[in-house]
Image (spheres, grey):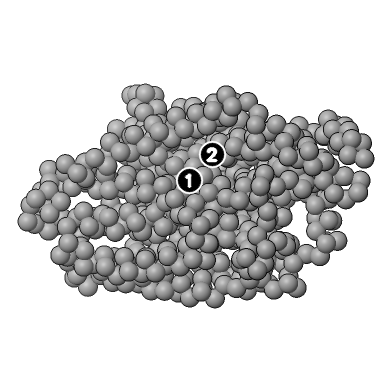
């Protein structure tokens, strides 16, 4: 019977389309450690969304090249977005950044269910086409000097590519690494945090190469990066494989309900999660954790400069009393601070997600909130009486937990709602990220302006903000403490699960069991060509190490 099942499955796979889910079911000899570098290849590319600020200043001089060609003062908004005779404002260009993360959350929520059924390869290819195609459309927008094409290309179409690319490996990695859920998703989502670390210095080098008397070099940079990213993302998409039905790692068995009630062996359908309290509690957990962190990241450079002023360079003077040379010196130190934060953001994604495999997801988030509350509350004191090293250290830990929150949440969802549709459920939860992307920066930015308006010295304008962010984390802690195992009535029945697996193109044998027999399943997930595994990891490790080295060089300024 097993031979006939295997033959039928092989015939069906041979007839399946190149991008179909059936085509990428792993066979005996496939090594599961080939999947994380495939996910990293995509996440390292789309993660450049974090680094788009490197383009704002050059694009604000796209026509004038060396000087800004200002628009007439009486030119209206609609006239500005179609004008080819004056330069764009940075505030107008920044709409691309807003659109990135709004569309990321919306597209992940809308098409997460489709992804589960279509498979990660098809989703990865669509992501590559959208992200890289968006860069090409933006390059055309620069050539024609039409800002609406940049909004449409990188913001809308690229944002859809971000959403699909971000969630494409989540479900697959969790199914390949049920024994290390946190670590597996942490590796991939670490790549998203590291994308700008590679892309920003690369973009800067390309712009300097292409810049000339008639061009700031951004159009050419977009085209080159689109080509490079397309190659990497397509390699990642075609590197994806899904485990065959019935596969588990050698020597691993699913935890029993008595061993850990927070990890279920059942599955919730994505269409039911809107009505489950645990989903909204986790929505609040993610939103509040991200709101606090993203607000600080967006203001990291001015915050360090305003809080410490001349103390950063051994001068006993406030920020407003420094001359031009001194301001330039502390700006360089602040740039090193932001570089150091990016490293902790990346490292925290892997470290905390891996730790959650040992501590448990709920306990890990409790650490985030309890420690975060203490650190935010201590930050004003550190800025007043502590040295800059203590202040920097506090925010490095805070940002590591910000990154860790992103990387831990997919495994938290899988624990509570099962693995069958975790990618789609994760997509819906990312609407919390879109909300936090607005809430966090608004709170930090508004409170800063409000405090300055009251005449508060620059060194103290962030004190109230830190207490507000600590209050957000108190609410997040309460949400996390209220999380309980999902009630049995919310899970799919055996018949509903079988129907969903059929829709998801998960092939089983004629007897309803695995299409591969036990001996064949035992050969899946390990072995294979070790050179291929090494090359796959090398392909993503080299650019990551280069990005880390460039970032460390900037961070070294902090210690001089």
The answer to whether residue 184 is visible is: yes
Q: What secondary structure is found at the residue carrying circle 1? A: helix
Identify the mark at residue 40; answer none if there is no mark. 2
Residue, far front: 251
**Quarter assignment of residue 33:** top right
Q: Position of residue 213 (x, y in %)?
A: 33, 24
Query: Quarter of the image containing the C terminus?
Result: top left
Please name the residue that numbered disc 1 is placed on. 190
Query: Quarter of the image containing the N terminus?
Result: top right
Image-based side of 506 in relation to 67, left or right: right
Q: Position of residue 23 (x, y in %)?
A: 77, 35
Image-based side of 495 in relation to 358, left or right: right
Q: Given contact means CB atoms under 8 Å apart, are the residues at marks 2 and 1 in contact?
A: yes
Of residues 326 and 26, the one nearer the viewer is 26
> Which label's residue is closer to the chain start, 2 or 1?
2
Q: Is residue 413 shown above or below 341?
A: below
Image-based side of 228 in relation to 386, left or right: right
Q: Position of residue 219 (x, y in %)?
A: 46, 31
Of residues 101 and 338, the one nearer the viewer is 338
Q: Residues within 10 Å of mark 2 (few under 14, many from 20)?
A: many
Q: Position of residue 385 (x, y in %)?
A: 15, 65
The answer to whether residue 137 is visible is: no
């Amino acid at each position: 019977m097993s031979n006939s099942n295997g033959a039928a499955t092989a015939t069906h796979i041979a007839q399946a389309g190149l991008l179909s889910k059936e085509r990428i079911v792993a066979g005996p000899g496939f090594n599961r450690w080939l999947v994380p570098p495939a996910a990293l290849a995509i996440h390292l590319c789309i993660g450049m969304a974090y680094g788009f600020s490197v383009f704002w200043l050059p694009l604000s001089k796209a026509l004038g090249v060396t000087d800004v060609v200002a628009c007439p003062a009486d030119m209206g908004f609609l006239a500005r977005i179609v004008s080819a005779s004056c330069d764009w404002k940075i505030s107008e260009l920044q709409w691309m950044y807003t659109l990135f993360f709004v569309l990321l959350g919306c597209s992940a929520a809308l098409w997460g269910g489709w992804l589960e059924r279509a498979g990660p390869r098809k989703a990865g290819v669509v992501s590559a086409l959208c992200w890289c195609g968006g860069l090409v459309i933006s390059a055309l927008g620069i050539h024609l000097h039409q800002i609406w094409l940049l909004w449409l290309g990188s913001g809308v179409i690229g944002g859809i590519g971000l959403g699909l690319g971000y969630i494409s490996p989540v479900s697959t990695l969790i199914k390949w690494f049920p024994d290390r859920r946190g670590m597996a998703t942490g590796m991939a989502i670490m790549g998203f945090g590291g994308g700008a670390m590679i892309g920003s210095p690369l973009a800067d080098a390309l712009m300097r190469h292409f810049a000339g008397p008639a061009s700031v070099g951004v159009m050419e940079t977009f085209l080159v990066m689109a080509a490079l990213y397309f190659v990497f993302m397509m390699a990642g998409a075609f590197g994806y494989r899904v485990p065959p039905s019935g596969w588990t790692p050698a020597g691993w068995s699913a935890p029993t309900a008595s061993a850990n009630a927070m990890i279920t062996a059942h599955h919730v359908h994505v269409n039911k999660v809107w009505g489950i309290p645990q989903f909204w509690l986790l929505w609040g957990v993610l939103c509040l954790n991200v709101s606090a962190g993203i607000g600080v990241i967006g203001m990291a450079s001015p915050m360090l400069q305003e809080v410490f002023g001349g103390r950063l360079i051994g001068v006993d003077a406030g920020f407003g009393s420094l001359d031009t040379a001194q301001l330039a010196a502390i700006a360089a130190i602040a740039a090193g601070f932001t570089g150091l934060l990016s490293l902790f953001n990346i490292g925290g994604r892997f470290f905390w997600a891996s730790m959650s495999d040992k501590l448990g997801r709920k306990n890990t988030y409790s650490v985030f909130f309890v420690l975060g509350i203490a650190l935010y509350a201590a930050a004003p004191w550190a800025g007043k009486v502590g040295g800059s090293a203590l202040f920097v250290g506090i925010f490095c830990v805070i940002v590591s937990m910000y990154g860790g929150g992103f990387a831990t949440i997919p495994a938290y969802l899988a624990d509570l709602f099962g693995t069958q549709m975790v990618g789609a459920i994760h997509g819906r939860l990312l609407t919390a990220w879109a909300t936090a992307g607005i809430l966090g920066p608004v709170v930090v930015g508004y409170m800063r302006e409000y405090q300055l308006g009251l005449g508060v010295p620059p060194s103290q304008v962030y004190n109230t903000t830190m207490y507000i962010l600590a209050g957000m984390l108190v609410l997040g802690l309460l949400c996390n403490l209220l999380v309980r195992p999902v009630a049995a009535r919310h899970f799919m029945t055996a018949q509903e699960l079988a129907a969903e697996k059929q829709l998801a193109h998960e092939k089983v044998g004629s007897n309803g069991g695995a299409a591969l027999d036990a001996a064949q399943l035992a050969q899946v997930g390990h072995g294979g060509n070790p050179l291929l595994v090494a090359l796959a990891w090398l392909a993503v490790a080299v650019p990551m190490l280069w990005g880390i080295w460039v970032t460390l060089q900037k961070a070294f300024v902090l210690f001089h």
